[in-house]
Image: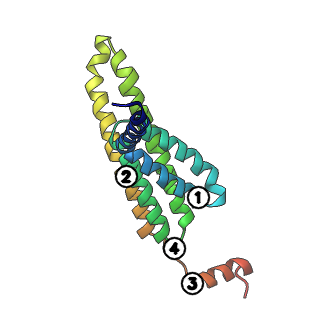
Amino acid sequence: MSNWTLPFLWIANGFLALLWLTVDHLWVILLAGALSVTVLQAPAHQQAWTLGVAVLSLAAGAVAPFPVALLLLVMTLAGLAAKRLERLNPQNTHWTLVRGLGLYSLIALGYAAYRNWLLPAMSDPALQQGQAYLSAIASIALYLFPLGALALLLQGLFVHPPVQGEADEIIYHFRSRGKP
C-alpha cells in the first residue's frame, strides 16, 4: 500500500464509522428530529416546557436500554398526529404529549439508573430477595406507560365534553353575561 492511498482509506474509514454510529443510534436520531418538530410547533407559552421535556426525553432515549428511544419516538409521532387532527383544543393535546413524554422520560432514566448503578451494587441478601419483584415492576412500567399515554392522547382526540351550543352562542352568552 502506498502513502498516497492512506488519506482515502482514512476518509473511507471515518465515513464507515459515522455510518455505523448513525445506524446504531438511529432511533435516537429520529427521536431528536421528532422532538425538534415538537418544540417548533409548541404554543408560545408552552415552548419552554416543551424544550425542557425534549432535552429530558433525548437524554432518556440515549441512556436507557433499547425500547425506550423507540417508544419515545412512537409517543412523539402519535402526539404530533393527534395535535394535527385535534380541532377543539390542540393546546391541551400538546400539553398531554409533553406531560406523557416527561413522565416516561423520568421512568426511563430511573430504570437506567436502577439497572446500571443499583442492581450491580446490591450485595445485601435482604435486598436481593426483592430484586426480582422490583425488576418486574420496573419492566412493566417501562412497557405499559407508553400505552397509557397513547390512550390519553386518543381520549383527548375522540372524547370531548358536550357543548352547550354553537361556539358563537357560547361566546355571546359569556360576553353579554346572559343579558339579551
Q: Are circles 4 and 3 on residues that touch, CB within 8 Å? A: no
The tag on residue 166 is: 3
Residue type at mark 2: give it: Gly
Q: Give the residue at x 30% y 40%.
A: 140
Instruction: Identify whether 55 is placed above or below 77.
Output: above
73 or 91: nearer the viewer: 73
Q: Distance of mark 4 from mark 2, alpha carbons?
A: 22 Å
**Residue 163: horizontal and vertical position, in percent?**
52, 77
Q: Distance of mark 4 from mark 1, alpha carbons?
A: 19 Å
Mark 4 vs mark 3: give the one in front. 4
Viewport quadrant of the N terminus: top left
Secondary structure of residue under mark 4: loop
The tag on residue 62 is: none
Label 1, on which residue? Answer: 40
Label 4, on which residue? Answer: 87
Q: Distance of mark 3 from mark 2, alpha carbons?
A: 32 Å
Q: Are circles 2 and 1 on residues that touch, CB within 8 Å? A: no
Q: Distance of mark 4 from mark 3, alpha carbons?
A: 14 Å
Q: Give the residue at x 53% y 59%.
A: 94
Residue lying at the far bottom of the rendered structure = 180
The tag on residue 148 is: 2
Mark 1 burial class by Cα count in 10 Å: few <14, some 14-19, many 20+: few
Residue type at mark 3: give it: Glu
Secondary structure of residue under mark 2: helix
